[in-house]
Image: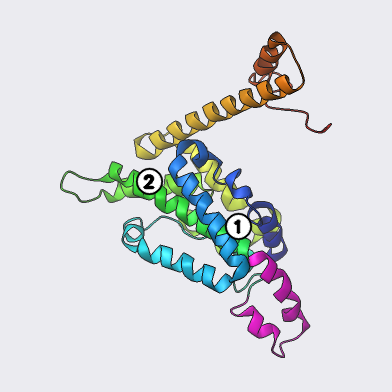
Amino acid sequence: AKINAVSRYFALAGDASIFTIQLLVAAFGHKKAYLKALRAFTASLARGIIDPQAATKASAAHLKRNRELINRHSTLKLGGGEFTEAFNPEGVLGATDLWAEAMSVRGLAQRGKAVPRRLLEPFKIATERALNEAGISMAEGLEVLAKNADGTFDQVKLQDIDNYINNVRGLMSSSRIGVNQASRIRESAVLLASQYRRATGALYNSMLQGGIQGELARKSMFKLITGMMMLGSAIEIIMGIEDGKAPGQIAKGVRERLNPQHPRFMLWTIAGQ
């Protein structure tokens, strides 16, 4: 499970891929939150490369500034979840103060972890900051849907909003849905990202439900599909022009790329692949 946590980090958090995986729905459905997360990731990564401790303090200060909103959204999941759990104290790359331990007499194993952690930690800090920024920004914009006429908030509606935001970011608490620690460990050893799969599945499932969560899920999925189709059309048109194709050929290519029953649906050949 610990080794799989490292693989999960490289696949889903060890670079900027969260913007084309975990936050892809937000890119089309919550553009402001997406852009704020992108800026936060870039700034945190740059700062983390120079001084990880300063970047960590900046992330903590960001949470402190938004503490009132976070307290209202008690079920909003913060942090990197399973994507960065390899850096938890019990993880393969985890330690309370790895550099201090590396200089101590704790042995070669700790010193061996110091270098990869130092190289990878900036991406961990940036990933968590980006996911937090996206979540807080979405909560700030959506909580008006749960506001009562007297200015108070409907707690059930707030929880629906939080669940939606968590699912959109690919974050889910296994314990909240009744998955015990033993099952969680077994899943982590076998599946690359069990919580991400659950969150994505919950987002799809909520599209069939009523209430705020269902409405938000349907709107986001519509925007995602529409946005991806427009993006696919643009790619096909640009590549067609670059290849010197006739307008009729380009139009045919666009129809093929947007037809789910066609073998070339949303597929392009790039550099012979």
Label 2 belongs to which residue?
A: 161
Per the image, is 37 magenta? no
Side of 147 relative to 91 (left or right)? left
Q: Where is residue 109, by image quadrant?
A: bottom right
Q: Amino acid at mark 2?
A: Ile
Label 1 belongs to which residue?
A: 83
Residue 83 position, x and y percent, is: 60, 57
Per the image, is 100 magenta? yes
218 w.r.t. 26: above or below: above
At horizontal 59% and vertical 49% (from top left) the residue drawn is: 18
Residue density around tag 1, few if under 14, some if 14–19, many if 20 or more, within 10 Å: many
Specify the segment rendered in magenta. 95-121
Number of numbered markers: 2
Front residue (pair 184, 57): 57
Residue 270 position, x and y percent, is: 78, 32
Q: Quadrant location of the N terminus?
A: bottom right
Front residue (pair 95, 239): 239
Q: Is there any visible trace of residue 248 in the rendered image?
A: yes
Residue density around tag 2, few if under 14, some if 14–19, many if 20 or more, within 10 Å: many
261 w.r.t. 73: above or below: above
Q: Where is residue 96, by image quadrant?
A: bottom right
Q: Is there any visible trace of residue 172 in the rendered image?
A: no
